[in-house]
Amino acid sequence: MKYSLNGLELNIQERGNGLPAIIFLHYWGGSSRTWADVIAALPGTYRTIAPDLRGWGESSATADNGFALIDFVNDILAMITALDVRHYVLVGHSMGGENCTIAGVAASPRTCWAGTDCAGAADTDEIGSRSAFAYGECLFL
């Protein structure tokens, strides 16, 4: 379903109505379809929410592109408010994990747990350290 948020049309896939809601955030270049298999494997008793972030999937982009971290986070927070989600878990991969971390902190005082995965191919300790600094907690597989 499409929602008008922050001057954009964001495509948001929703299923179920349980608590807490699970919000899935995709990587750079991904879409809500990134999480389709994961969502399908969950019992229908969970409320799942998977947006196409601005400029990806079926969501629109702004004329100035607006692909800064703060733009994505503001869209995520606007979506949470528009959907009246009060208790939720944020799950993200790569860019989605970065968005989870920032949105989770900014979402206070709502009840939020953020699970992030910014896994990558770290060849050196320096790359790993930079990633950990940029993304918060990183898991390198």
Image: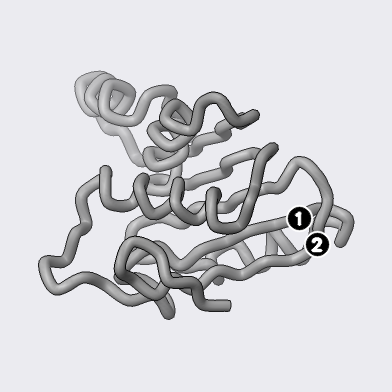
Q: Which residue occupies the extreme left position in the image?
A: 64
- Residue that label 2 marks: 16
Q: What element carries label 2?
A: loop
- Residue that label 1 marks: 47
Q: How many labels does the image show?
A: 2
Name the disc covering residue 118, or none: none
The residue under label 2 is which amino acid type?
Gly
Q: What element carries label 1?
A: loop
The residue under label 1 is which amino acid type?
Arg
Whether residues under marks 1 and 2 lie with C-beta atoms below 8 angstroms apart, the answer is yes
Residue nearest the observer in this picture, 8 or 89: 8
Q: Residue 122's x, y, as percent? A: 31, 33
Name the colouring of the figure: one colour
Identify the residue shown where x is 27% and y is 20%.
Answer: 129
Identify the residue shown where x is 63% and y is 58%.
Answer: 49
> In the rendered view, does 16 fall on the left or right side of 86?
right
The local crowd at label 2, few if under 14, some if 14 to 19, many if 20 or more residues have their Cα within 10 Å, is few
Residue nearest the observer in this picture, 53 or 109: 109
Identify the residue shown where x is 20% and y is 49%.
Answer: 68
The local crowd at label 1, few if under 14, some if 14 to 19, many if 20 or more residues have their Cα within 10 Å, is many
Rendered-image quadrant of the N terminus? bottom right
Which quadrant of the structure image shows residue 123? top left
Which quadrant of the structure image shows residue 120? top left
